[in-house]
């Protein structure tokens, strides 16, 4: 099985090396097509990566045309593509199902976190395979019907999601120009969405509102593509209303459009909207409605960020802790977030710190202590458990407490522990304290 990796780029000298390093030894061939660099990107690739096949394509505001030019040079059994601001993490299995493969994209943001999306990045090299769409291009195989599979042995890191990166590369202006051309040629739900999305990123919310609503009005119930874009168009429309502070229009959306759009992100957005307005009843209603849709997986995974599963729980936890000063409810929602699969040390520490203030559950406190210690190796956590272990009726835990005490406690702390043990009649343990 041979995989061809196709990459197009322009003025990517700062990123192309990282991208090529991540893939060059994992595939049959790498093809890089330059679309007009004047910063030496093409020369850099030729000099430092002699194994890479290179070429030039004159940029014409059409991503599919450039990618299809690269595909024509590919000889592999499968066609895979990366952008220069991305890198592949993982391995390719020896055998792949004949079809289209969806990859998880880890979109890194300016806060040091990432948002996960899913995108089709590899396709079997069948007759007629190509890209379509001038921007936000997608694979197409008009002559062969292919099934879609989830790629499970790797993912893609996307550095260009950061606002700082977008501004540096002037991505929004480039995208608006290309998308406006597509929109003027064919007004469809997808062209309206992508152009509206770019205006939202540029914080031109009035233009976002108009285009999103136009896209909604263009939706045809029997069109599969329209049904794909339906939930995200409704969500984008709601987002533009909230950003503009149009409270009356938001209320109309709630009553007339929310259930039509069926997007969990819309419910979560309304939850946050009503948190700011301190409307607890609506906050809870939309938070739990969002969770209902998320857990039912009503939407294609492509349009539902993985971390949205935890957002309602976290938002409601913060509300009860900060606004209501209700630690027990805050703890409940934090534990629900953790139970939903959230693996975040900061949240675990919040749960750990709240437990003694809310419920004297030593078993649960020990459980979180051990999880956090495995992540941080902070020995102060071990010291936290001395009192719990000494209070236990388990002799092994009693001895563990003394071991931790002898290893980590100061002479003054050890003296206090001895006095405590004498007070509770545990002279047998006093002897073990150094």
Image: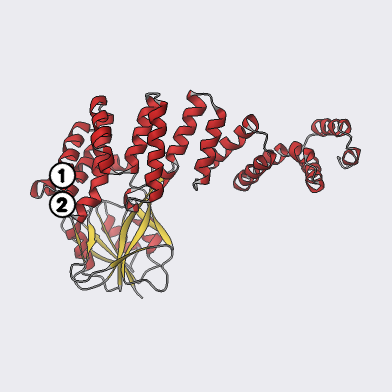
Q: Which residue is mark 2?
A: 61
Displayed quadrant of residue 202:
top left
Displayed quadrant of residue 203:
top left
Instruction: Describe residue 390's horizontal placement relative to residue 92 as left or right.
Output: right
Q: Tell me whether circle 2 and circle 1 mark residues in contact (CB < 8 Å).
A: yes
Closer to the camera in the image, 346 or 211: 211
- Does residue 163 appear in the picture of this structure? no
Q: Tag 1, which secondary structure?
A: helix
- Does residue 270 appear in the picture of this structure? yes
Q: Tag 2, which secondary structure?
A: loop
Instruction: Describe residue 312's horizontal placement relative to residue 356 as left or right.
Output: left
Q: Residue at x 22, y 61 (%)?
A: 67
Quadrant including the N terminus? bottom left
Badge 2 density bin: few <14, some 14–19, many ≥20, Cα 10 Å: some
Q: Residue at x 38, y 50 (%)?
A: 296
**Rendered location of residue 310, percent (x, y):** 45, 42
**Residue lying farthest to the bottom in this orientation:** 1
Q: Residue at x 18, y 51 (%)?
A: 221
**Rendered location of residue 336, percent (x, y):** 51, 41
Q: Residue at x 9, y 46 (%)?
A: 184
Labels 2 and 1: the sequence-earlier one:
2
Displayed quadrant of residue 363:
top right
Q: Give me the C-alpha separation between circle 2 and circle 1.
A: 8 Å
**Residue lying farthest to the left in this orientation:** 185
**Rendered location of residue 177, percent (x, y):** 15, 44
**Rendered location of residue 66, percent (x, y):** 19, 59
> Could you say which disc has been placed on residue 177 in the image?
1
Closer to the camera in the image, 80 or 126: 126
> Could you say which disc has been placed on residue 120 in the image?
none
């Amino acid at each position: 099985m041979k995989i061809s990796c196709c990459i197009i780029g322009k003025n990517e000298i700062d990123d192309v090396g990282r991208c090529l390093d991540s893939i060059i030894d994992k595939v049959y061939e790498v093809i890089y097509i330059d679309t007009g660099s004047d910063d030496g990107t093409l020369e850099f690739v030729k000099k430092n990566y002699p194994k890479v096949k290179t070429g030039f394509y004159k940029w014409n505001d059409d991503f599919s045309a450039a990618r299809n030019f690269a595909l024509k040079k590919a000889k592999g059994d499968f066609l895979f593509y990366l952008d220069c601001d991305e890198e592949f993490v993982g391995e390719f299995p020896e055998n792949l199902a004949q079809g289209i493969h969806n990859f998880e994209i880890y979109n890194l943001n300016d806060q040091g976190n990432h948002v996960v999306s899913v995108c089709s990045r590899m396709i079997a090299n069948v007759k007629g395979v190509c890209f379509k769409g001038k921007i936000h291009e997608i694979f197409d195989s008009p002559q062969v019907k292919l099934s879609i599979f989830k790629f499970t042995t790797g993912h893609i890191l996307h550095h260009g999601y950061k606002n700082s990166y977008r501004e540096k590369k002037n991505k929004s202006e480039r995208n608006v120009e290309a998308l406006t051309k597509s929109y003027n040629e064919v007004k469809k739900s997808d062209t309206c969405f992508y152009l509206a999305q770019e205006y939202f990123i540029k914080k031109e919310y009035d233009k976002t509102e108009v285009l999103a609503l136009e896209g909604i009005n263009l939706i045809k119930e029997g069109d599969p593509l329209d049904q794909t874009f339906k939930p995200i168009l409704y969500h984008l429309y709601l987002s533009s209303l909230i950003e503009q502070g149009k409270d009356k229009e938001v209320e109309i959306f709630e009553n007339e459009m929310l259930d039509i759009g069926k997007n969990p992100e819309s419910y979560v957005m309304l939850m946050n909207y009503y948190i700011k307005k301190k409307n607890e009843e609506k906050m809870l209603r939309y938070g739990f409605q969002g969770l209902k849709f998320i857990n039912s997986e009503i939407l294609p995974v492509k349009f539902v960020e993985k971390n949205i599963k935890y957002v309602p729980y976290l938002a409601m936890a913060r509300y009860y802790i900060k606004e209501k000063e209700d630690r027990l409810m805050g703890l409940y929602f934090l534990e629900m977030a953790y139970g939903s699969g959230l693996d975040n040390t900061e949240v675990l520490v919040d749960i750990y710190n709240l437990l003694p203030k809310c419920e004297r559950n030593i078993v649960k406190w020990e459980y979180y202590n051990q999880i956090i210690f495995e992540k941080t190796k902070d020995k102060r956590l071990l010291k936290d458990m001395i009192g719990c272990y000494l209070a236990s009726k388990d002799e092994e835990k009693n001895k563990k407490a003394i071991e931790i005490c002898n290893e980590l406690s100061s002479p003054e702390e050890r003296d206090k522990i001895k006095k405590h043990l004498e007070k509770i009649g545990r002279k047998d343990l006093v002897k073990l304290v150094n």
